Image (cartoon, grey):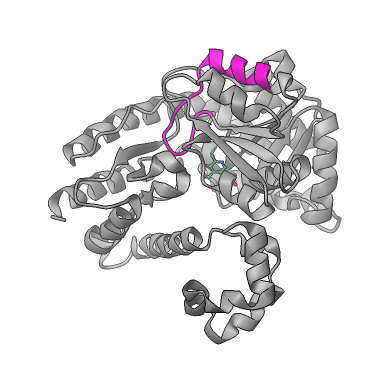
């Protein structure tokens, strides 16, 4: 239901008659009037399902070391690469946290953009990975994971009622962020083969921003170099901001990673967003950054300073060494994960699933087996009958209907165990 209608239904009391509202709130219906339009437009069904999957996945992790580890749940739903053996996290945390300066810094509010040392380390990483130079003093901003950067970038550049262009399928947070902000979504076919220029041009005409994510979650597609140029040219023609989510830049299998900001005309209108959640397998650290021309980063920093003032000093202290150590383990990460991708494809095929060879990231994206009506239906069956957690495809966009996403980035044995369980459990 559109945002405005929902609001009218709530304000007039008609929403009380809705069975979903009755089921969720019952006598607490009173509180509905307290909720803002942003909350009222949240994708409640999907969020409830995700909450259930997340709870199951969390239980899976706590059961792992328990006595019944043999039949513990296996979580393939979350994108958490297992990189524990690539660097010694405790040593890095200890040496960064126990410094006298850190203790002193904890007694002050961190600087709005970030500490100079952390900003400089991000600039060095981006320059080494992509060849794009950013001034750490004015063109980089730290945030609490890529998620915060994405949310504030949308808030900073796109007003309710304006449009944002997304590729289909795409990371489910993008449409959710848009939906809760009242931003219209225009979807164009994903870059699986090549982008359709006419379709993209139609979508970008009058749109305020386009979000790209290469390699992509959920299907691991990478945008072809010529298509990056096309996006850059159309963004310039239609005066669109480009938000480039580059969290999977360290996981590229079919081609070298290229940031759209490498294209000179794109750099001046692109905000690059990334984090250590995937590159280092540290989603719990919540260490992320935005990079772009200062005319885009400054307002973003201003907005962030009002919303969530800054990133914890502890995170900022540990970031330089984490980024430094990545340059040493990146070649081994590439070698091992490339081999794991091929092995995951074979295991999935043996379990009866076909998936395109992903160009990047660490997911497989497959059709649900015959007999299941949707990705939701299959995810529920996997959870209840196989004790395996996978993501239904539907929240990722229209092309996710009847699909599911499963991660092979976690511990190797988990993926093998999950495929074997699914293979031996009859629907
Ligand atoms: C494409 C994409 N962007 C952003 C994120 C979230 O990153 P972070 O943990 O840094 O907030 C994810 C997490 O799965 C993702 O897949």
The answer to which quarter of the image holds residue 348 is top left
Q: Quadrant of the N terminus?
A: bottom right
Q: Residue at x 44, y 42 (%)?
A: 398
Q: Residue at x 69, y 33 (%)?
A: 207
Please indicate whether residue 383 sits to the left or right of residue 244 in the image. Answer: left
Q: Quadrant of ligand 1?
A: top right
Q: Is residue 142 above or below residue 314?
A: above
Tell me if I can see residue 110 in this picture. no
Considering every residue shown, the one lying at the far bottom of the view is 27
Q: Quadrant of the C terminus?
A: bottom left
Q: Is residue 256 above or below residue 115?
A: above
Counting from the top left corner in percent of width and height, residue 104 is at 83, 54
Counting from the top left corner in percent of width and height, residue 296 is at 81, 33
Please indicate whether residue 110 sits to the left or right of residue 216 in the image. Answer: right
Please indicate whether residue 319 sits to the left or right of residue 394 in the image. Answer: right
Magenta residues span 214-234
The answer to which quarter of the image holds residue 7 is bottom right
Counting from the top left corner in percent of width and height, residue 336 is at 38, 29
Give whichever of 212, 124 is nearer the camera: 212
Q: Residue at x 30, y 48 (%)?
A: 414
Counting from the top left corner in percent of width and height, residue 338 is at 37, 26
Q: Residue at x 50, y 38 (%)?
A: 170
Give whichever of 176, 124 is nearer the camera: 176
Number of marks drawn: 0
- Residue 59 highlighted magenta (yes or no): no
């Amino acid at each position: 239901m559109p945002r405005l209608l929902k609001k009218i239904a709530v304000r007039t009391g008609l929403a009380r008659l809705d069975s979903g509202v009755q089921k969720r709130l019952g006598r607490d219906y009173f509180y509905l009037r307290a909720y803002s339009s942003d909350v009222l437009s949240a994708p409640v069904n999907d969020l409830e399902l995700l909450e259930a999957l997340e709870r199951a996945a969390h239980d899976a992790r706590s059961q792992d070391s328990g006595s019944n580890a043999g039949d513990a749940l296996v979580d393939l739903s979350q994108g958490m690469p297992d990189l524990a053996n690539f660097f010694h996290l405790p040593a890095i945390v200890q040496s960064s946290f126990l410094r006298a300066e850190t203790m002193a810094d904890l007694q002050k509010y961190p600087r709005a953009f970030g500490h100079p040392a952390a900003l400089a380390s991000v600039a060095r990483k981006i320059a080494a990975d992509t060849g794009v130079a950013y001034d750490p003093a004015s063109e980089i901003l730290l945030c609490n994971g890529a998620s915060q950067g994405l949310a504030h970038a949308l808030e900073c550049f796109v007003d309710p009622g304006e449009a944002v262009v997304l590729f289909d399928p795409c990371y489910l947070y993008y449409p959710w962020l848009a939906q809760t902000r009242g931003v219209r979504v225009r979807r164009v076919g994903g870059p699986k083969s090549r982008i359709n220029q006419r379709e993209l041009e139609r979508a970008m005409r009058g749109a305020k921003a386009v979000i790209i994510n290469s390699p992509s979650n959920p299907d691991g597609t990478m945008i072809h170099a010529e298509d990056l140029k096309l996006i850059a040219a159309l963004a310039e023609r239609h005066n669109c901001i480009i938000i480039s989510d580059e969290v999977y830049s360290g996981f590229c299998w079919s081609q070298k990673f290229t940031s759209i900001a490498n294209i000179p005309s794109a750099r001046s209108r692109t905000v690059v967003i990334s984090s250590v959640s995937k590159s280092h397998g540290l989603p719990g650290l919540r260490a992320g950054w935005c990079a772009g021309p200062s005319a885009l980063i400054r307002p973003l920093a201003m907005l962030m300073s009002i919303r969530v003032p800054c990133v914890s000093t502890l995170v900022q202290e540990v970031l330089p060494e984490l980024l430094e150590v990545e340059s040493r383990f990146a070649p081994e990460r590439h070698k091992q994960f490339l081999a794991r991708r091929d092995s995951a494809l074979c295991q999935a095929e043996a379990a009866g699933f076909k998936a395109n060879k992903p160009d990047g990231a660490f997911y497989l994206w497959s059709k649900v087996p015959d007999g299941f009506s949707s990705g939701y239906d299959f995810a529920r069956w996997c959870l209840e009958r196989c004790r395996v957690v996978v993501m239904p495809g539907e929240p990722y966009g229209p092309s996710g209907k009847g699909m599911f996403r499963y991660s092979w980035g976690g511990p190797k044995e988990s993926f093998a165990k999950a495929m074997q369980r699914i293979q031996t459990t009859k629907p």
